Amino acid sequence: MLLAERFCKELGYPLVPREKLSLPALIDKYQVAGVIVAAPDKVFYYTGEEEFFFHPNMAAVRIKDIRSGKTDQMVKAMDLRPGDSVLDCTLGFGADAIVSAFVTGTSGTVLGLEVSPVIAALVRYGIKNYNFKSKLLSSTMRNITVINASHYEYLLQTAANSFDIVYFDPMFRQPKYKSSNMTPLRKLADLSPLNRDVLVEALRVARKRVVVKERRGSSEFARLGIDRIEGGKYAPVVYGVKNKDND
Ligand SMILES: C[S@@+](CC[C@H](N)C(=O)[O-])C[C@H]1O[C@@H](n2cnc3c(N)ncnc32)[C@H](O)[C@@H]1O
């Protein structure tokens, strides 16, 4: 089966011939919001203005830093250890999940939930097929399981204490225009804020703690009832922590 066919089958999208059309002309002809292009060297979603494709750039940099002994603030906020299980409720490009998978190692597990079917399909393909220079990183990434689901529904169906850490990195309310790696994602992603019902379920499902990433100074923490904030002293993003035993 052609790669493009596999994506169409998974997403329930029609498979159309390219007919030597440019991608904007293809979008115009079929009057669609975007197309998935499955080329041998790259699979991407094209919206007429931007391309979305999986690339684990940031994860590689962070893992290199961890290996050289630097502190990764997400890992610290999670108190993540080898063998832990992580439920990443907002998978997106998967950078945080890859870092988690590196720390938890082969004895741990990382399951990523992503509500956008296109993002989930591209990232699932990417983490199974992208090759880092380092074999260890490639095999680390292959340990992540991707599920296309909304986190609230998934949490509701999950037994208490199923994962050591439950993690959220919701789209920021104010886009960070300087951060270009999230710009294409905003077109495809669910931008809804978290709510307290989701946090209640997350705490039930977590064995150790729930961690929420937000911008420094965000009013989201107060709205969600999270008062323990961790992170670098001057970092633009910080982590809200809710420990299981505090609640
Ligand atoms: C800021 S991005 C996450 C980035 C990710 N942590 C990374 O390292 O690449 C947030 C992602 O969560 C997804 N999302 C938002 N609401 C969701 C929900 N209810 N269930 C699952 N995924 C959701 C968005 O579609 C988006 O892809």
Image (tube, grey):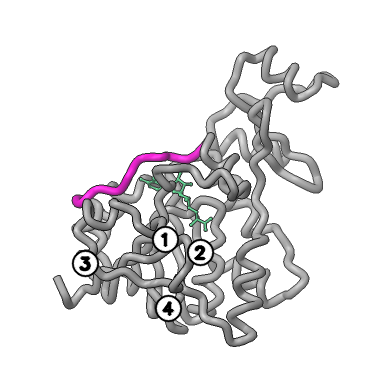
Where 162 sits versus 124, above or below?
Answer: below
Q: Please name the residue that numbered disc 4 is placed on.
A: 76
Q: Which mark is residue 8?
A: none
Q: Please name the residue that numbered disc 1 is placed on.
A: 88
Residue 40 rendering spot, x and y as whole percentages: 80, 45
Distance in Å between CA atoms under marks 2 and 4: 14 Å
Question: Is residue 239 in view?
Answer: yes
- Of discs 2 and 3, which sits in the foreground? 2
* Amino acid type of the residue tagged 3 in the rendering: Ala
Q: Please name the residue that numbered disc 3 is placed on.
A: 160
Quadrant in the picture for residue 209: bottom left
- Of discs 3 and 4, which sits in the foreground? 4
* Amino acid type of the residue tagged 1 in the rendering: Asp
In which quadrant will I find the N terminus?
top right
Distance in Å between CA atoms under marks 2 and 1: 7 Å
- Circle 2 packing at 10 Å, graded few (<14), some (14-19), many (20+), is many
Q: Residue at x 34, y 50 (%)?
A: 151
Q: Please name the residue that numbered disc 2 is placed on.
A: 97
Specify whether 65 is left or right of 107.
Answer: right
Where 208 sits versus 40, above or below?
Answer: below
Q: Quick check: is 190 in the magenta stretch?
A: yes
Lower position in the chain sequence, tag 3 or tag 4: 4
Distance in Å between CA atoms under marks 1 and 4: 15 Å
Q: Is mark 1 within 8 Å of ligand 1?
A: yes
